[in-house]
Image (cartoon, rainbow, N blue to C red):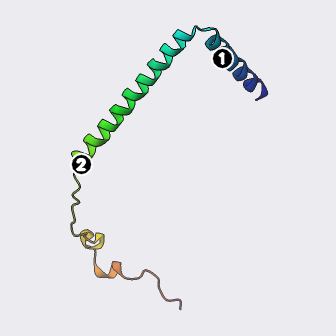
Amino acid sequence: MNKLRANIDQWLEGLDKNWEEMPIKRQHQLLLYFFAAYVLLTAVVIFNVCRDTVYARNKMAIEHIDSPASAEKESPESLQDSLKPIK
């Protein structure tokens, strides 16, 4: 576990070093690209949520629930209590 943490820390330090070595103009450009992608993704999600709520059917079918006992057509004797008195 410590080796994994050390590898991750080393990888993050390398990324930070590369970011600091990058020219400021390139850093700003990359930030704008990431922000534009975030805004586009957010707009798509909001559009899909709005579209789904507009076309949603909020109707619930209410029907009578049939008893499973009547559907099996068993004799009334088999539907009675199966416990027999102890003699």
Q: Do the residues labelled 2 and 1 touch (CB within 8 Å)?
A: no
Location of residue 4 (image quadrant): top right
Q: Nearer the viewer, mark 2 or mark 1?
A: 1
Residue type at mark 2? Ala
On screen, residue 22 above or below 85: above
Disc nearer the start of the sequence (2/1): 1
Q: Is mark 2 on a helix, strand or loop?
A: loop
Q: From the viewer's perspective, is 37 left or right of 8?
A: left
On screen, residue 64 above or below 26: below
Question: In percent of the image, x 44 and y 18: which residue is there?
Answer: 33
Give the class, few, some or many, for how many residues have Cα within 10 Å of label 1's Cα (few <14, many ≥20).
few
Q: Which mark is residue 16?
A: 1
87 or 18, which lies in front? 18
Q: From the viewer's perspective, is 82 left or right of 5?
A: left
Which quadrant of the rendered structure holds the N terminus?
top right
On screen, residue 76 above or below 64: below
Residue type at mark 1? Asp
Question: In percent of the image, x 27 and y 69: which residue is there?
Answer: 72
Q: Where is residue 22 in the image (x, y as percent from the top left)?
A: 59, 8
Q: Position of residue 78 (x, y in %)?
A: 34, 78
60 or 63, which lies in front? 60
Q: How far apart are marks 2 and 1 (CA)?
A: 47 Å
Q: What element carries label 1?
A: helix
Question: In percent of the image, x 23 and y 55: which residue is there?
Answer: 58
Q: Residue 6 carries which label?
A: none
- Which residue position holds label 2? 56
